[in-house]
Image (cartoon, rainbow, N blue to C red):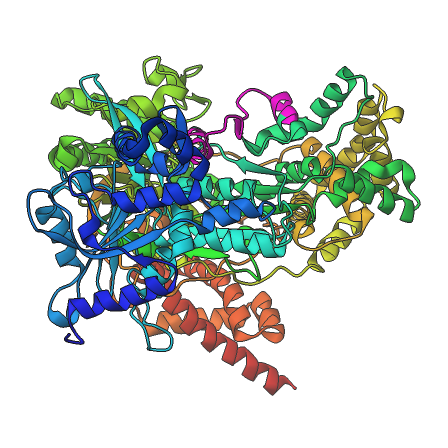
Amino acid sequence: MKRTSEAAFETAIESILLGEGYTPLDGRGFDRERAIFPDEALDFIRATQAKVWEKLAALHGEQTGTRVLESLCKWLDTHGTLATLRHGFKCFGKTLRMAFFRPAHGLNPELEARYQANRLGLTRQLHFSPKSEKSLDVVLSVNGIPVVTLELKNPLSGQTAANAIHQYRHDRDPREPIFVFTKRTLVHFAVDTEEAHMATRLAGSSTHFLPFNRGVDGGAGNPPDFDARNYKTAYVWEEALQRDSLLDLLARFLHLDVQEKTTDDGKKIRKESLIFPRYHQLQAVRQMVTAAASEGVGHNYLVEHSAGSGKSNTIAWLAHRLSSLHNERDERVFDSVVVITDRVVLDRQLQNTIYQFDHRQGVVQKIDEDSRQLAEALETGVPIIITTLQKFPFVSGQLAKLSEERGEGSKSHLPTRKYAVIIDEAHSSQSGETATELKGVLGGAELRRKAQEMAKEEGEVELERLFLAMAKRGHQPNMSFFAFTATPKHKTLAIFGRNGQAFHRYTMRQAIEEGFIEDVLKNYVTYKTYYKLIKKAEDDPNVERKKAAKALARFMRLHPHNIGQKAEVMVEHFQHFTRHKIGGHAKAMVVTGSRLEAVRYKQEFDRYIQEKSYPIKSLVAFSGTVEDDKIPEKSYTEVEMNRGLKEKELSDAFARPDFRVLLVAEKYQTGFDQPLLHTMYVDKRLAGIQAVQTLSRLNRTHPLKDDTFVLDFVNEPGEIQEAFRQYYEGSEMGEQVDPDRLYEVKAELDASGIYLQTEVAELAQVFFAPKRRQSPGDHKTMNAILDQAVARFVQWQNTEEEEAELWRGKLQAFRNLYGFLSQVIPYQDSDLEKLFTYLRHLALKLPKRKSGPGYQFDEEVELDYYRLQKISEGSISLDEGYAKPLDGPREVGSGMVREELVSLSRLIDMINQRFGGELNEADQLFFDQIAEAASLNESLQKAAAVNSLDKFQLVFRQVLESLFIERMELNEDLFSDYMGKPEMQELVSKWLGSQVYDRLAEARKAGR
């Protein structure tokens, strides 16, 4: 045998599997008509179910084997291989099993012995067809039933996995008994020494193969063997198809997914898919289950899986495994699994999937009514509970009611049990106050005991509820969190990660390269708006620079000409390009910058479409009611603009063939799946995680979808690239938050004198009072305590508004920092919890900022000229550039002092210079003047004296813009260049910053 031949590859695989508990099965014993190894099947039944066999033999005598095989094959043809292996088949009223799966625990030695009695067979070059002598390279069977086929190729002899895929598609008739969908073999592998692919349904040239690869360096493919001694694809037979692993896959992973869909002409069709886990799903579930079994309860597991990773199935498999997980001592690890999700599709999928595994009702309960239903499910210990996070704050009250109804007093907590909490989308809301309520409910009796202990130690027994509020923030020893997300924030990595790292990762890059999601940046076109405003009013009032600039920008964005021009570009592009994509079914989304813009775009879209008689219908999505800024007392709602279509019906309506464009304002930009969405028109500033989540609405695949398209009127390609780079190959945690910063902010708040420590303590006494001491007058008392601080704040606001607003920012910073840090660091300081509670309530009562003059420039300003110009077209590459780490929350109470006043005419000039005209070379003299002015700036002198160059650059960047604006008339072209090009800002700021820093350093030396 040639060492580079296919046969040598087969032999290498065979020797591993035979050493792992498989037995060689002679292909001559295969019944080609019935696609089964009859002798192997009967031997297994006789050996493991002798008593049932004897009863059947008493009825059928010598015909017993024939009768059993007839019943088995009929059952397989009706119910399929998977159901037969899991639940057995009926033969003349007797149940016979065709496999015994490993029990969840080792408490019953008889079950373990039965499991060991399974016969896994390996057959090479199996001649499978009753009509020809075609053969399969390798077939694996379980107790005589063929379940896995492999076609092997060796690149050293000139063939690859692609040839094996071609062979399955064009040389393997799906009507052959061995290939009939779900009735015999369940999965087909096309494998070479580099890559592996698998399919669960042969359908001729339409057969769909999925990659079954480990991934390498965040991308597709497989890494080389660490010791350079093995095939890259050895994991297929050494891990996935190893004896125990294959039986585990058949018992707890493979499942039939049945979906009923309505076609365009109203017919209902039923689509069946057999789901076999992809490698990353199998690895993630097994690694988490193994870790949970060995570590026990009380640990966190963050799963960073990109869109397109098959998260719903991963969660279903994980939930099922955790619900019956036992450790080495055969003790149950978790009493209940709680799945937190907002997706209706997930709970239906979980119920269907898990029922297929163990045919028991009541294993999964979906909480779709109220918090009482959740309280009952938690109290009775339902194995898997599916609910939303929002129901937890009300559970304690419901538990007390249930307890009273049973005549057991008012017990508002659960007994201490062990919980696995699976979070479907671990974003920031899962780390806020509602998540703390979840911990409070599931913490049960043990959490209350801990709170009582802390209250005793502090000598504040009456404030047990205060210590309970503190205790439930931190790590809970009776809960393990399994948190899934595609786009983690710093907070997510800090709370659920391990040393800031995800427990398991499947990257955006790998999902794109493996074809599970589209690359939404491949076709990206940016437009820039050039316009000129002129002042038409006679007077020239002084206005606040930044505020008035915002008002002018709003005037421009809502200007009918601006919206009309952009709407025309979008509609014409959709009509001539997008409409014909995805077999003529493509849809588009328009992302607008505000609810009023969404209203204006919807009106303009419908007007233009009607004028042109295009066959396009649009829908709009925004929350609440929008007041018209031109017509008094005129308002708009989503339902009214969509002609009575209810909010809940909108996504289903958009799926219909007649609706092609969806215009959105802060809705449908996360978690919205519509595979027919092909094009996105962006007229909104996007940054960071929001850019990734919004543009990712396009990434869902469809059999007829071969590309996507983005037309962006606002954002720079470099900014979009930077946002996506953070998640493309997996996120990295950046700078940590200093825990002592919390005490610094507290000291600054205390020093202001807005509140007194006695008031904080008084509010805590009322808010955290035990139930027996609570009274209807508590609300009045709390308001009276808070009103004293509110009065002081108002007085301060009237005299020194900027300082008061700076303090408000610090208040918010304290709340954010404590809410985050108390989950990561076990603060044992009741004063922090008291202040947090006090400030949480005070913030709601403080008057809104006196925001100074609000500007409406409809009368004073008009549009002089307007031009839309295509700036860039092509692909935004994610293989270049640097992925910024995700930094922790900064202290956000740094406050802004109000801008200086400038004349309206000057501001209009500034805006025009930024957005109009051609850009030319800079001039050295202008830079020298800027550098000179910066060197004389007092705040820069102070900053340079105490900071490194890096830190100084941050301060300098802010001052530099002001210096440019002040001197813009000296070199207007250069000013335009600077304001309009972020890359130039970066270059100039760094270069000038280092020059000024050096000048100031020299000046300090000279002054010594």
Q: Quadrant of the N terminus?
A: bottom left
Above or below, 2 against 429 in this view is: below
Displayed quadrant of residue 264: top left
* Foreground residue among 804 and 746: 746
Q: Check residue 910 for magenta coloring.
A: no
Q: In x, y percent, where is residue 852?
A: 57, 37
Q: Main secondary structure of the magenta part?
A: helix
Q: Residue at x 28, y 65 (%)?
A: 13
Q: Quadrant of the C terminus?
A: bottom right
Number of marks in picture:
0
* Left or right of 937, for residue 506: left
Residue bounds of the magenta highlight: 347-376
Residue at the limit of the structure toward the left, as seen here: 132
* Left or right of 795, for residue 960: left
* Foreground residue among 395 and 101: 101
* Left or right of 603, for residue 609: left
Q: Residue at x 35, y 66 (%)?
A: 217
Above or below, 76 against 334 in this view is: above
Q: Residue at x 49, y 69 (%)?
A: 933
Displayed quadrant of residue 97: top left
